[in-house]
């Protein structure tokens, strides 16, 4: 399966990355990681470096791409253009109360993506 | 999200009544409202609320809370029945069982609010009184800004929050985010 994982700077993305790498080691999916700025990343450079480190340390082959502007539509466009089978994203963070809050990028992708979207919690 | 991103109304809402108090609901049931820590011990509150949330209708769950199983309910309550949070529990006078719970959980300098009412006590004014009493308790104990999220389709809840003084502060997401300002000097002296 051709998998597109979106990774921003929030904790939920770190969790999604961790889980997807574990899974990809088992399934052998064809993985591409799209890094995007959700306002919480120091910079795309740093985010990209972090993702590359994680790929190397987990021994997973994967391409790393950048989504420069509007992250939600950028990810959907990339998935459409290059024929990805599935998009994977962080599935929300918890408020102090414990309520799950799904971020704007995930909301946009769930509504607008032409393929199955997995939100990792 | 940090509180710097939220817009709170300039004008405070209220005045709101403070616990302990009682009120008769629209079905003539007497409901008593007690603050955890002052009117009600923390441990008693914890065990009575576990019972209430075990009976909670899954359809009334919001954004993943309350959790559905007992260990998770107890863990969640441990996290919100803390010294720095404000909790008010509604008791049915007839059975002395908890039928509603409102909580204000610290989020930096501001507080996040959630309120839950057992299905049999919904639509009878209990939620309104519980919310008002929790805000009164907050105002009397130093809480000056409160926010919450609510699912857009939850019309009755959105209407209740609007009526109480919450204003919508953000558009374009699954949930509505609403904010309210409290003035400590304006709490009602009696319930």
Image (cartoon, coloured by chain):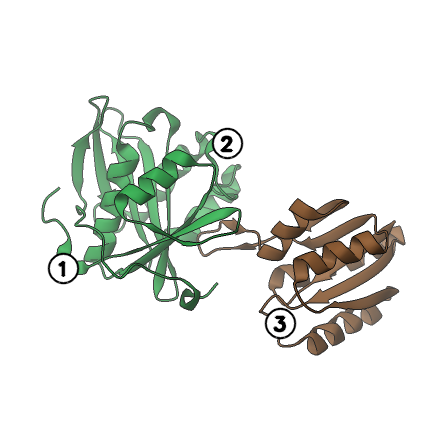
| Figure check: B190 above or below A62 | above
Spatial CA distance of label 2 from label 3 is 36 Å
Tint of chain A: brown
Q: Is there CB contact under 8 Å for labels 3 and 1?
A: no
Circle 3 residue: A41
Circle 2 residue: B58
Spatial CA distance of label 3 from label 1 is 42 Å
Chain coloured green in this rendering: B
Spatial CA distance of label 2 from label 1 is 39 Å
Circle 1 residue: B185
Give the image location of residue B24, x and y in percent. 18, 28
Residue B156 visible at all: yes
Give the image location of residue B172, x and y in percent. 52, 51
**Upstream in sequence: badge 2 or badge 1:** 2
Which of the chains bears the disc numbered 2?
A: B
Looking at the rendered structure, the secondary structure element under dot 2 is helix
Within-10-Å neighbours for mark 2: few <14, some 14–19, many 20+: some
Using residue B114 as the reference point, say whether residue A82 is left or right of it.
right
Looking at the rendered structure, the secondary structure element under dot 3 is loop
| Figure check: A94 above or below A34 | above
Which of the chains bears the disc numbered 1?
A: B
Q: Residue at x 32, y 34 (%)?
A: B98
Q: Residue at x 62, y 76 (%)?
A: A42
Give the image location of residue A91, x and y in percent. 63, 52
Give the image location of residue A59, x and y in percent. 86, 66
Are discs 2 and 3 both within one chain?
Answer: no
Using residue B55 as the reference point, say whether residue B120 is left or right of it.
left
Are discs 2 and 1 both within one chain?
Answer: yes
| Pick the front one: B50 or B115 | B115
């Amino acid at each position: 399966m051709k998998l597109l994982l979106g990774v921003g700077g929030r904790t939920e993305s770190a969790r999604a990355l961790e889980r997807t790498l574990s899974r990809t080691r088992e399934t052998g999916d064809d993985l591409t990681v799209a890094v995007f700025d959700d306002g919480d990343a120091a910079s795309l450079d740093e985010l990209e470096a972090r993702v590359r480190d994680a790929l190397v340390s987990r021994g997973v082959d994967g391409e790393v791409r950048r989504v420069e502007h509007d992250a939600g539509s950028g990810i959907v466009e990339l998935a459409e253009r290059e024929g990805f089978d599935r998009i994977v994203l962080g599935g929300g963070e918890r408020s102090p109360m414990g309520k799950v809050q799904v971020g704007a990028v995930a909301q946009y992708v769930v509504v607008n993506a032409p393929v199955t979207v997995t939100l990792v919690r | 999200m940090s509180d710097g991103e939220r817009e709170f109304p300039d004008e405070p809402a209220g005045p709101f009544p403070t616990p302990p108090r009682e009120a008769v609901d629209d079905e003539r049931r007497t409901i008593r409202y007690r603050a955890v820590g002052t009117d009600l011990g923390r441990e008693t509150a914890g065990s009575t609320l576990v019972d209430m949330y075990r009976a909670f209708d899954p359809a009334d769950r919001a954004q993943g809370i309350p959790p559905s199983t007992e260990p998770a309910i107890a863990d969640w309550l441990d996290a919100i029945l803390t010294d720095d949070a404000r909790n008010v529990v509604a008791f049915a006078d007839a059975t002395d069982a908890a039928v509603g719970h409102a909580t204000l959980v610290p989020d930096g300098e501001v507080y996040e609010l959630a309120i839950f009412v057992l299905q049999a006590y919904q639509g009878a004014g209990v939620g309104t009184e519980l919310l008002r009493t929790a805000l009164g308790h907050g105002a009397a104990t130093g809480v000056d800004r409160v926010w919450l999220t609510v699912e857009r389709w939850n019309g009755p809840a959105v209407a209740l929050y609007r009526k109480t003084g919450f204003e919508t502060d953000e558009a374009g997401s699954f949930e509505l985010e609403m904010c309210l300002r409290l003035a400590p000097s304006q709490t009602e002296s009696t319930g």
